[in-house]
Image (cartoon, rainbow, N blue to C red):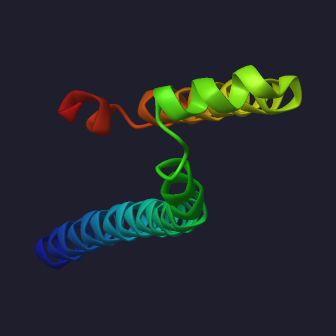
Amino acid sequence: MGELEEEYRTLQASQQSILQTLKQHRDDDASRGQAVKNQKALWDKTLEMRFLLQKAFTTSNKLPKDSTKSRFCSHDQEIEQAYVDLLDSSKQTLGSMLELQEALLERNQAAKEDF
């Protein structure tokens, strides 16, 4: 009878061990699933931002080159001020994007290693 009780305890301990392992795997899978979900949401937002910025970048490529810009700006102070404001706004946008990139890289060490 003692051997049966010992075998029963061994089986019960084995089942508990298996149960703990399964719970750990479940928790790991849930954590990975949440990380993938967050990554997909971030990717979607990044792609959306890229689409929104594409129009601005395409338009900025149509701005006059230096020689033409100088002629416009020298004739009208308002045009020169608008051009300066445009450059300042562009610099601020680029700065914000770089800050966002740094923050994202800081939160994701794996991506930081690839950079």
The residue depicted at 49 percent of the width and 65 percent of the height is 34
**From where the camera sits, is residue 2 visible?**
yes
* Residue 62 x/y as whole percent: 51, 53
Q: Left or right? Give the position of 2 relative to 94.
A: left
- 54, above or below 107, in the image: below
Q: Quadrant of the N terminus?
A: bottom left
Count of marks, rendered view: 0
Which image quarter: residue 11?
Answer: bottom left
Q: Is residue 108 above or below residue 48?
A: above
Horizontal side of 78 relative to 108 (left or right) equals right
- Judge by depth and name the residue closer to the eye, 4 or 56: 56
Task: Reply above or below: 91 against 2.
Answer: above
Report which quarter residue 73 is drawn in: top right
Foreground of the two, 35 or 27: 35
Looking at the image, which residue is at 34% across and 31% down?
Answer: 109
Q: Is residue 36 left or right of residue 68?
A: left
Q: Residue 79 appears in which quarter of the rendering?
A: top right
9 on left or right of 23: left
- The answer to whether residue 84 shows anywhere in this view is no
Check the picture and name the quadrant holding the C terminus.
top left
Q: Nearer the viewer, residue 11 or 73?
A: 73
Q: Residue 100 in the image: x percent, y percent?
A: 57, 35
Residue at 54% from the left image edge and 30% from the top image edge: 103
Residue 60's x, y, as percent?
A: 54, 48
